[in-house]
């Protein structure tokens, strides 16, 4: 018996549905891989913080974070509420010494890190070299970074510091990337708080 040919419209519809299913599968597979990678990063950071001396541990954590986000530099600051300043606790290699010197003590509210900590929210710049918002300080521009993202470090609902990454080219960080950096910052937060002066630790108890 001869088979009845399926109308072209039906074939096209089936192809479309198949394409949608394949796209959804690819999307879910991609999300699964990304989540698995993020869990691996979380564990790697936790292991470093638990087994490495604090100063070298912060630098090692930054290397992991910078690589994960395909950035080029990063810093960790701790907030000392007693004098209202952020103190540099860790930085990646390659940041010029004059820039590091200017970053070792930052007034709360100044610069990208200070603004993020004061406002309790992420601060992102596509190109800090041309930014005219007043957030980027001259020292930050001297790093040569363009795209930058800085998030507050939350210990519970308290801000204990700031975590920042920068790229050598223009970059707009996505909402998912910002959420990821905030999440990784929460792992860092208790270790940052433990590195602050004793008066600050009492405030957190």
Image (cartoon, rainbow, N blue to C red):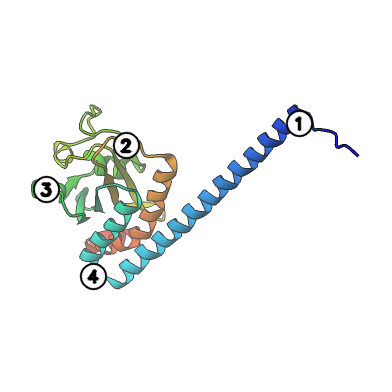
Q: Nearer the viewer, residue 84 or 49?
A: 49
Q: Is residue 179 left or right of residue 100?
A: right
Labels 4, 1: front one:
1
Tag 3 residue = 96
Residue 51 x %, y %:
30, 73
Residue displayed at 22% across by 53% down: 82
Residue 171 tag number: 2
Q: Nearer the viewer, residue 46 or 64?
A: 64
For the residue carrying disc 1, how many other residues have a C-alpha within 10 Å: few (<14), some (14-19), or many (20+)?
Answer: few
Contact check, label 4 and label 2, Cβ < 8 Å: no
For the residue carrying disc 2, how many other residues have a C-alpha within 10 Å: few (<14), some (14-19), or many (20+)?
Answer: some
Contact check, label 2 and label 1, Cβ < 8 Å: no
Labels 1, 3: front one:
1
Contact check, label 4 and label 1, Cβ < 8 Å: no
Q: How far apart are the two marked residues, 1 and 3, measured between alpha carbons? A: 64 Å
Tag 1 residue = 10
Q: How far apart are the two marked residues, 4 and 3, measured between alpha carbons? A: 24 Å
Q: Secondary structure at mark 1?
A: helix
Residue 53 tag number: 4
Residue 21 x %, y %:
64, 42
Image quadrant occupied by the C terminus: bottom left
């Amino acid at each position: 018996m001869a088979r009845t040919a399926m109308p072209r419209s039906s074939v096209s519809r089936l192809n479309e549905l198949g394409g949608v299913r394949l796209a959804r599968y690819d999307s879910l597979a991609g999300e699964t891989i990304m989540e698995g990678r993020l869990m691996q990063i979380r564990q790697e950071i936790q292991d470093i913080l638990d087994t490495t001396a604090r100063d070298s541990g912060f630098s090692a954590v930054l290397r992991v974070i910078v690589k994960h986000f395909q950035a080029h530099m990063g810093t960790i600051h701790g907030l000392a509420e007693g004098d209202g300043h952020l103190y540099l606790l860790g930085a990646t290699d390659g940041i010029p010494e004059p820039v590091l010197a200017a970053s070792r003590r930052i007034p709360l509210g100044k610069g990208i890190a200070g603004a993020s900590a004061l406002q309790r929210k992420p601060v992102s710049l596509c190109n800090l070299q041309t930014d005219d918002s007043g957030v980027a300080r001259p020292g930050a521009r001297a790093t040569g970074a363009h795209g930058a993202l800085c998030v507050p470090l939350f210990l519970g609902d308290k801000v204990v510091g700031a975590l920042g990454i920068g790229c050598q080219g223009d970059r707009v960080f996505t909402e998912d990337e910002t959420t990821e950096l905030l999440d990784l910052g929460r792992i860092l937060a208790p270790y940052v708080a433990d590195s602050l002066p004793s008066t600050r630790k009492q405030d957190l108890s």
